[in-house]
Image (cartoon, rainbow, N blue to C red):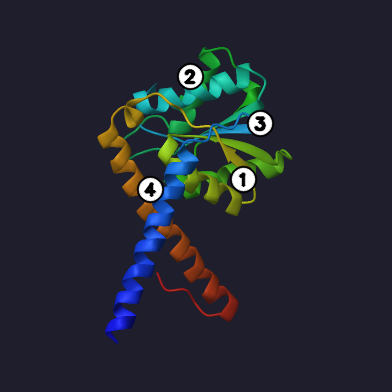
Amino acid sequence: MLRLFFGAIVIGMLVVGGTAFRVWQVARVDDWTKADVAVVLGAAQYNGVPSDVLEARLRHALGLYSKGVVGYIATTGGRQPGDNFTEGQVGKLWLVEHGVPEDHVLQVGEGADTLGSLRAVASVARERDLKTAVIVSDPWHSLRARTMAEDAGLQAWTSPTRSGPNVQTRETQLFYIRRETGALLYYRLMKAHAGVFEELNLPKIG
């Protein structure tokens, strides 16, 4: 029994360590392969003005569009209680102000989290026959966002921003690697959990 206990601990450590390494590894990837659309994941906005985090992502997506890497940019993110704008609206306003034609910005102001936003983007992409997407977020968010985009039906890769407050210090980087490791493991666990219930045709709990 003790051997099984320690064996489980070792396996758990390997899974967590391996996932953390993949989060770090994918964070270093900046893929400018041509895609149908760049997906800018939402972040805070203040009464129509993007936060520093959101602006850094928008600037990076603008660079992808300006270089001809993508033909469209999708701006995502919903509205917090009391907000006058969605994050998706603010992203579109900023991009149009910086020279992107309005009909080349797909405003997807839905989704309260990464998964909800990417599912909403995938739905819009299917309507427009857009199949490939480059995900624009912070580096440490890349692996989880890419995984969710692919699960939603997009062929996706990542080109994260290298500026903004979330990528400035080593302490910040370590914090987000730990957070994203836990979030990705939780997502994979809950997705598998849901899949078991679907296969058995049993009701899901929670």
Nearer to us of marks 1 and 3 is 3
Return the mark for residue 94.
2
Query: From mark 4 to mark 3, how far is it between C-alphas?
Result: 25 Å
Q: Nearer the viewer, residue 7 or 65?
A: 7
Query: In this rendering, is residue 151 above or below 136?
Result: below
* Lower position in the chain sequence, tag 3 or tag 2: 3
Along the line of sight, the residue nearer the viewer: 82 or 117: 117
Query: Which three-letter amino acid code belongs to the residue tagged 4?
Result: Glu
Residue 70 as seen in the image, left or right of residue 120: right
User: What's the distance in space between the residues labelled 4 and 2, CA to CA?
Assistant: 28 Å
Q: Nearer the viewer, residue 146 or 37?
A: 146
User: Residue visible at 47% across and 61% down?
Assistant: 188
**Separation (CA) of disc 2 from disc 1:** 22 Å
Say which amino acid is labelled 3: Thr
Residue 63, image x and y in percent? Answer: 56, 19
**Residue at numbered disc 4:** 180
In the picture, the disc for residue 33 is 3
Helix, strand or loop at label 1? It is helix
- Does dot 3 land on a helix, a strand or a loop? loop
Position in image of residue 151 (x %, y %): 59, 54
Disc with the residue nearer the chain's start (4 vs 3): 3
Residue 128 lies, with reference to residue 68, above or below; the image says below
In the picture, the quarter occupied by the C terminus is: bottom left
Which comes before the other along the chain, label 2 or label 1? 2
Instruction: Tell me, yes or no, if residue 110 can be seen here.
Output: no
Q: Nearer the viewer, mark 4 or mark 1?
A: 4
Which is nearer the N-term, disc 4 or disc 1?
Answer: 1
Q: Nearer the viewer, residue 39 or 177?
A: 177
